[in-house]
Amino acid sequence: MKLTAVVAGLAALSGLTACSGGGSAAGAAGSAPPLTVAAYSQPTLQPNFNPFSVNALRGTIGLIYEQLFDFNTAHQNEFMPSLVTKYTWAAGGKAIDLSLDNRAKWSDGSALTADDVIFTFDYLKQHQLLALPVDTVIKTADGVHLTFSKPEYAAIQDLGRTVIVPKKVWAGKDPDTDTNLQPMGSGPYSLGQVTGQQATFTARSDYWKQKVPVPQITYVTTSSTNLLTQQLVRHEVDLAYAGIPDVKNQFVQRDAAQNHLWPIYASMKPLMLNLTRKPFDNVHVRKGLALAIDRQAVTDAYNPGVYQPVGPTGLYQGNWSSWIAPADRDPVKPDKAAALAEFAQAGYQQQGGKLIGADGKQLTLRILTVSAFADGMAYSQELAGQLAALGIDAAVNGVPSAAYTGDEDKRDFDAIYGDAFTFGTNPYTFYDRMLSVKSKTNLVGWNDAATETALGALAQAAPDAQLAASKPLQQIMLTQLPVIPVAVKGTPYMYNTEHWTGWPSADDPYTTPDPGAISGVFASKLFLSLKPA
């Protein structure tokens, strides 16, 4: 979103204070200390609190504005209420009833009602911002009733993450240009002060759901991983989720009693081959590459303990074991002999330590990744080294971020190791974004009628039928290898307990400790659950 000259001028000021109603932090949490989150790597923040903008600052959703509901991806996808207390499917997935929490209020004290929810959906449709196929939204006795043109069971998480705004404020706003510098939401915080390096949120004393324990939350920028490491070790930052090298030694072991790391395994990183480029269109080449990779060595290449090897279906065996056949759960182990046998079926033989094809040329593979990402470069170099040991002319093509995106868009690459695909409440979105011919993130060029049929069936499958409906897609991953699953990506949430306790952990995974980059419901649940140390 382009900022207007007026907003750009405001951003240049040393501080920007916005009033959004609601009580003060002192009334909400007494003398409890503030909480600091390292949330940005860019040098300067541009004030933007438009919840429909891709440039909205973190905290806009979750702290100021609330979503309908979500599912706890840190623990068995349990339902997490927010503005909605329950949902009920109807009409075979073509309709859903949402029960609203009748306590909900905007920060000016007025009630948040079904009219606001209906307005929000209509507003999103009017401005072509609604990705969900919602036909109608009408008021019911305890909430709203939504209808769809076809069963939409698979869209439940996207539906839950709809941000609700007050009709009386947003009826006159343009979502494409308005940066919403005085936001009025229903969440537990009001906007405090914004500078170029931080954004502060102040607890509401009149929040409708409960007393807000953390009086102030400050999201700050960090210019480098070295600086972030120092800030974490000195406990100047309470929560961070950036990639620090050797995080266990550099952070956790520096104060094992108070410094904690909890990787949340929410997405999968595959080696993606350009299937429109020979010889990667040959399934035996793909199988040979898959059998050549030592996945444990890849995941240990930069930050041991943060990533984990993943099984061949792409679904993480730690969280999705009940969905995966026992024989297909474990990551594929490297097998040189089996890899060479697959390459042989594709016409490649080892000659003088090189893997040579029928055309007399060595198999060549360049792995595209972003050169500025130290972790991505390390993982890609480990992959290239392993494949080179088998006789492949393999190397890393590290390029700037803009060039990486451009080469992806043009499909000008042999292979990519950098993108990750998020697991949802069921595998539909995960597989759809990787493999559907309609998906903009199907970067490999996979175009397969059986895949489209299976995706369509899974999209419309009722919750109790989704496991069975996922099996054809798992089989396509196992037999056709449209992508090669390598690792499950752990987001390394790092926090300390000097100032605040009650953090979620592997022993108490009540939410993902996310400060608003993924889900506002996760963020709100986190900050409403902490206690002063």
Image (spheres, grey):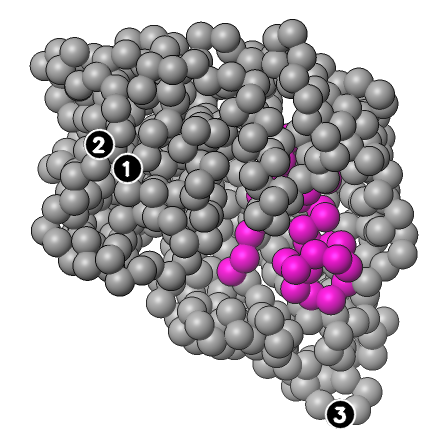
Q: In which quadrant of the rendered image does the N terminus lie?
A: bottom left
**Marks 2 and 1, the one that precedes in the sequence:** 2
Residue beneath disc 3: 360
Amino acid residing under circle 1 = Gln
Towards the viewer: 319 or 341: 319
Which region shows up in magenta?
A: 418-446
Horizontal relation, residue 164 to residue 256: left or right: right
Q: Position of residue 37 (x, y in %)?
A: 25, 37
Residue 41, image x, y percentages: 28, 54
The residue under the point 60% across, 71% down is 409
Mainly helix, strand or loop, the magenta region?
Answer: loop
Circles 2 and 1, Cβ within 8 Å, touching? The answer is yes
Q: Which residue appears at 76% of the width and 28% of the height?
A: 147
Q: Residue 514 is drawn in which quadrant?
A: top left
Q: Do we see residue 521 in this rendering?
A: yes
Residue 288, image quadrant: bottom right
Disc 2 and disc 3: Cα gap in Å? Answer: 71 Å
Amino acid bearing label 3: Gly
